[in-house]
């Protein structure tokens, strides 16, 4: 069985996949992200794809969902954990919902089980506080994995941005799903 953690967005979605036949640790996960600017570095288990420019949201959303489905692969023994919407979100909330709905529809058509997890639950799981900031989530990730994603992907940045924050979130979503599964 594979557990898939998805931090879904319109600009830099990230996916972490773990095969439950292996012990859960970062090096046993496969991570994917889609971003308009790709860094010059990567790890063997992190796979990047360049997000193309689109003339309309429908093409963009379809492309992102297709990319996600390709990352997930053809296996049927999969459970997807998807980060839910932030309740205080502002801005393009309808576009975010439409984008996510296309992914959910594709997962549903394949018969893949989807569990939506509130962002506050993932933050509490990863850092210990439901209102954790991106920097705190990265701090928890680095403490657990010793993988310096900031040095590799954002060496000059003072704050966590994409793809680092997205990869960290998808990792903790996947780990949350794994622990939920083994504690059933």
Image (spheres, grey):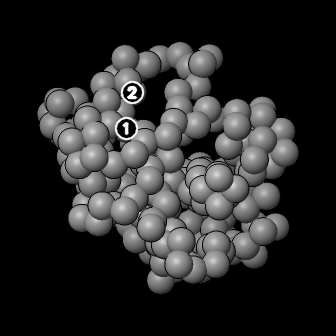
Residue drawn at x 36%, y 33% as measured from the top left: 100
Labels 2 and 1 touching (C-beta < 8 A):
yes
| Residue 8 picture quarter | top left
> Residue 42, relative to residue 183: is it above or below?
below
**Camera-side residue of 36 and 139:** 139
Residue 163 appears left or right of 155: left
Residue 101 appears left or right of 44: left
Residue drawn at x 43%, y 19% as measured from the top left: 93
Q: Quadrant of the N terminus?
A: bottom left
- Residue 142: give x, y in percent of width and height: 75, 66
Residue drawn at x 44%, y 50% as measured from the top left: 80
- Residue 82: give x, y in percent of width and height: 49, 42
Structural crowding at the residue carrying mark 2, measured as other residues with C-alpha within 10 Å and reported as few (<14), some (14–19) or many (≥20): some
- Residue 168: give x, y in percent of width and height: 62, 56
| Residue 113 picture quarter | top left
- Residue 158: give x, y in percent of width and height: 72, 52
**Tag 1 or tag 2, which sits nearer the N-term?**
1
Structural crowding at the residue carrying mark 1, measured as other residues with C-alpha within 10 Å and reported as few (<14), some (14–19) or many (≥20): some
Residue 106 appears left or right of 77: left
Q: Secondary structure at mark 1?
A: loop
Tell me the distance, in whole angstroms, between the alpha carbons under discs 2 and 1.
Answer: 7 Å
Could you tell me if residue 159 is visible in this image?
Answer: no
Residue located beneath label 2 in the image: 96
Residue drawn at x 65%, y 52% as measured from the top left: 184
Determine the residue located farthest toward the bottom in the rendered image.
Answer: 44
> Residue 79, relative to residue 44: is it above or below?
above
**Camera-side residue of 21 and 34:** 21
Determine the residue located farthest toward the front in the rendered image.
Answer: 184
Residue located beneath label 1 in the image: 10
Q: Secondary structure at mark 2?
A: helix
> Residue 177, relative to residue 46: is it above or below?
above
């Amino acid at each position: 069985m594979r557990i898939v953690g998805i931090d879904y967005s319109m600009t830099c979605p990230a996916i972490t996949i773990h095969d439950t036949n292996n012990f859960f640790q970062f090096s046993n996960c496969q991570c994917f992200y889609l971003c308009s600017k790709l860094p010059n570095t990567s790890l063997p288990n992190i796979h990047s794809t360049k997000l193309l420019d689109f003339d309309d949201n429908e093409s963009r959303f379809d492309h992102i969902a297709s990319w996600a489905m390709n990352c997930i692969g053809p296996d049927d023994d999969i459970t997807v954990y998807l980060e839910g919407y932030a309740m205080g979100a502002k801005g393009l909330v309808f576009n975010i919902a439409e984008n996510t709905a296309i992914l959910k529809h594709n997962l549903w058509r394949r018969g893949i089980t989807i569990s939506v997890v509130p962002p506050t639950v993932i933050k509490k799981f990863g850092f210990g506080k439901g209102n954790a900031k991106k920097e705190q989530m990265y701090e928890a990730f680095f403490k657990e994995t010793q993988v310096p994603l900031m040095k590799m992907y954002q060496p000059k940045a003072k704050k966590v941005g994409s793809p680092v924050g997205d990869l960290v979130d998808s990792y903790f979503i996947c780990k949350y799903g794994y622990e939920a599964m083994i504690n059933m």
